[in-house]
Image: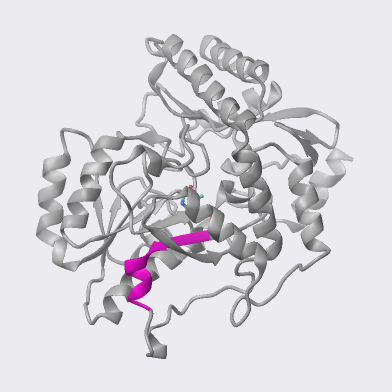
Amino acid sequence: MQSELIERDRKVNWHPYTQMKTARHIPIIRGEGAYIFDANGKRYIDAVSSWWVTLHGHAHPYIAKKVAEQLNTLEQVIFAGFTHPVAIELSERLLNLLPDNQEKVFYTDNGSTAVEVALKMCIQYGHNQGVRKNKILAFKNGYHGDTFGAMSVSGRGLWTAPFGELLFDVLFIDAPTKENLSGTKSFIEKHASEIACFIYEPLVQGAGGMLMHEADDLSELMKFCRSKGILLIQDEIFVGFGRTGKLFAANHLSAQADIMCFSKGLTGGTMPLGITTSSQKIYDAFYSNDKTKALFHGHSFTASPLACAAALASMDLLLQEETQQNIQRICKQHQQFVNTLVKHPKIKNVRQQGTIFALEWKIEEDTSYFSDMHDILYPFFLQRGILMRPLGNIIYLVPPYCISQQDLEYIYFCILDALETL
Ligand SMILES: *Cc1c(COP(=O)(O)O)cnc(C)c1O
């Protein structure tokens, strides 16, 4: 069955981020906990939470039950002119967990669109008040999604090159360090009057290579931007819902953003859903008798009741004592593993933030997403029953919280084996 599925897939499907000529796709038939199973019954540990979305494991029975109940009650309703109890409850409960300045929830259906909405909120925030600020500040090596706005504010590279001239005006700064902060501040100061907003991935720049910076440095940068009238968009699409060891990256920071973006782990990785939250100040700039001041954005599946039900179920699980203990256990295991690796001759850098672990393999060339090291490492781990997806020469782990201590130890063992033998 495996080879037949592969053949049928080749004939009809075009996969994301894939050079189709050289790629091969493994048919997965079912998932359970931290495992996925292919058509031959081979088991893989999902060490990357299927592109960083799965929080509580695959096919979780509690989430399945809640979604099934919702499916039998109300599967979908237009969210303009109508509302529904699941979206109300999800917004209430999410806002309760977020920094206290977050007051309103805007729904979309993926991370990129959550970012698009955030950018539109910031630009129209100025427009509605007769202020023209069109520049956006962002980190080099950032990633905020693949739609045009989100792509524009992401780091530029080979994958944005075909669209380069169509992307809008962004000022790129380095992620903060103690050393570069004062230089960055004077750069921002010079352009402050044109900058509408600053968008950033807090603490961990995921797709850019699991790059990490200090909470204190980011907080200082946020406070500086705020003092210059620059709105802050905190993209927690990857780091939200426990990945950094705390519920949100915001819980590590001493400054608050105006707008926050969520997706990925929001539904425990079961259904597509995006959320953009905002402070009262942002919301009030759209609140008017003037119809043209409304936020003109919406998707067919805005606030899908099924996805909202999944998000509520995932939140129940996330807040359970057992899940919180698992998160802390993963943090500790990662930490211990990092300590054993720091001086390894084949490693350029090893780092960790909460449940996120990353290891930069030393190579001749500069670190790169297109490094051939990927083509050696990826099959090495697959053969050993581990799904990892190195970003070039960077190996990383973003496991679902239900992963067992033994499975995590087995993954570490295989990483050490790779370091020994490759
Ligand atoms: C994945 C990601 C996005 C985009 O989300 P999609 O649902 O894939 O469109 C945006 N920002 C960050 C930080 C991400 O990791």
Q: How many marks?
A: 0
Looking at the picture, how far across and down is residue 91, in whole percent?
55, 60
Residue 42, placed above or below residue 3 = above
Identify the residue at horizontal 57%, vertical 34% (top origin).
389
Q: Is residue 193 visible?
A: yes
> Which residue is at the far right?
1
Looking at the picture, how far across and down is residue 104, in whole percent?
45, 65
Q: Is residue 109 magenta?
A: no
Position of the N terminus by quadrant: top right
Q: Is residue 17 visible?
A: no
Left-right relation of 338 to 253? right
Q: Quadrant of residue 233?
A: bottom left
Q: Quadrant of residue 43?
A: top right
Identify the residue at horizontal 39%, vertical 11% (top origin).
345
Identify the residue at horizontal 85%, vertical 39% (top origin).
2
Give the extent of the magenta segment. 275-286
Position of the C terminus by quadrant: top right
Identify the residue at horizontal 16%, vertical 40% (top origin).
181
Left-right relation of 304 to 187? right
Residue 284, placed above or below residue 288 = above
Residue 189, placed above or below residue 239 = below
Looking at the picture, how far across and down is residue 350, in whole percent?
40, 22
Residue 119, placed above or below residue 245 = below
Looking at the picture, how far across and down is residue 23, in whole percent?
65, 43
Left-right relation of 414 to 360? right
Q: Nearer the viewer, residue 391 or 114?
A: 114
Q: Nearer the viewer, residue 188 or 141?
A: 188
Image colouring: one colour
